Image (cartoon, rainbow, N blue to C red):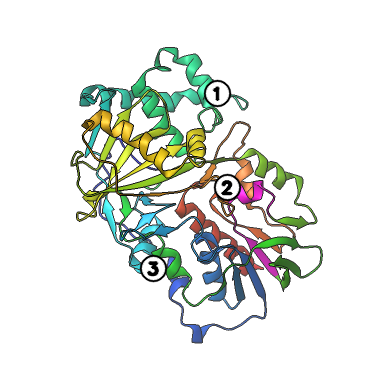
Amino acid sequence: MHRRKFIKDTLARLPFVLLAPSLLASCSKNEDDIKANGKTVLVIGAGIAGLAAARKLKNNGFNVIVLEAQDKIGGRLRTNRSLGIAFDEGASWIHGVNGNPISTLAQEAGMTTYFTDNDSFVCYDIGGILRSDTLYNQTETEYYAILDTLKNSGSLTQSFETVFNNLHPTKVNDRLWKFFLSTYFTFDRGDLDKVSSLYYDEGEEFEGEERISTNGYDTIPNYLANGLDVRLNQRVSNIDYTNAKVKVTHNGSTSEADFVLVTVPLGVLKNNSIQFSPTLPATKQTAIQKVGMNCVNKFLLVWNIAFWDDENYIAYTPELRNKFNYFVNVKKFHPAVNALMTFAYADYGRQTEAMTDAQIIDEVMAHLRDIYGNSIPNPTHLLRTTWDTNENAFGAYSYTAKETEMYHFDDLAEEIHDKLFFAGEHTSRDYFSTAHGAYLSGIREADKIIAL
């Protein structure tokens, strides 16, 4: 699956196609028409999965309480506005607008977006040497050709990197190939040395434009949460589903419910931040262990002047992978702001979390000065994320690691005894690692509970 489509897509400029209103009818139901059914649901986590489920359940007569560990809703849909613009720390793009439920939610929530034209792109090599479009396009075509076939040589226990290096040894040290394997592959799929060589390209995707949020992705969870009973700063430590009623311990107190829906990120489950009584079934524990959790950190840098190319994307091909090699020109959709957004992935992304702001700026500026010259100034402001050490996430999103089987995503979604349910992007076999996958998983679990 490709979260961003760098290749030219003939469908890219198709009109915004929305879902049928009936698919989102739960968002507009009149409360006076709702008949209480006497059942209580506790939803753990106020991310998009939990809020989508909670809203639908409430509209179907359930008493719904959402417990959120953080001091605001949204989960990994977090927006930082401290510099006067919306910096989305988690999800930024709607990945394929046609038929994507996020497209409809964005419009209903008042989220504004900008079409990030993949043709508006420039790539530099070391020394500020402009790479030719011909070489870049040829390499891109070959990259996708390899993605189509490498799985035929893969195995359950081998990483993509191992198989790729064996099949294409001449490409291993090529800087342009390092860029593709970093920004095209690792950004989307996880650590190159840990991603499955069999299932790296699994998952479905929506067609159409890629659009980046311009006023904040958190407009969607804020919209979904309207009218819901969401209780903030409530960290869940234990879920006891031994008896007919499920008991949830949070901040030292206990609440009971007929059903509990757990929507915390996979990283939180991996960290055993919540204790389950009895322990989770072996199949679910195995799935938690086997499915990977990627790290992508984002960095917003602001200057008094703009010195870079007037393109949507600026690429750089250094010797090291995963390190500030791809820049989004924020000025294209915020013309009054001189800002770039860049990224660090996988192990280097994790390393940045121990670095100071000054060290981050030095590393980013070393790349930009190699492109644009030593006279360009340091940024005036920096915003950054630390997803791997964030106790509410422990990573950015799930991926197919070595030894991951596709049924593991189904195991992560499997309910227990018709009273303990699970949602989140990591429970979506088709749309894992995406905001729309998380949203659809919440609707899926709400439907299960309603059916009972």
Q: Give the residue type that dot 3 points to.
A: Pro
Secondary structure of the residue carrying tag 3 is: helix
Question: Is tag 3's residue or tag 2's residue first in the polypeptide sequence?
Answer: 3
> Which image quadrant for residue 133?
top left
**Region in magenta:** 259-273
Q: Which residue is mark 1?
A: 154
For label 1, the SS is: loop
Which quarter of the figure has residue 404? Answer: top right
Which part of the image, by quadrant, shows the N terminus?
top left
| 285 falls in the magenta region | no
Q: Secondary structure at mark 2?
A: loop
**First reached walking from the N terminus: tag 3 or tag 1:** 3
Q: Amino acid at mark 1?
A: Gly
Place of residue 64 in the rendered image (x, y in percent of width and height, measured from the top left): 60, 74
Q: Earlier in the sequence, mark 2 or mark 1?
A: 1
Nearest to the observer: residue 157 or residue 125:
125
Disc nearest the viewer among 3 and 2: 2
Badge 1: few (under 14), some or many (20 or more) residues near its Cα, within 10 Å? some
Going by the picture, which residue comes out furthest to the top?
A: 170
Q: How many neighbours does mark 3 have within 10 angstroms: few (below 14), some (14-19), or many (20 or more)?
A: few
Q: Residue at x 31, y 37 (%)?
A: 6
Residue at the spot of label 3: 21
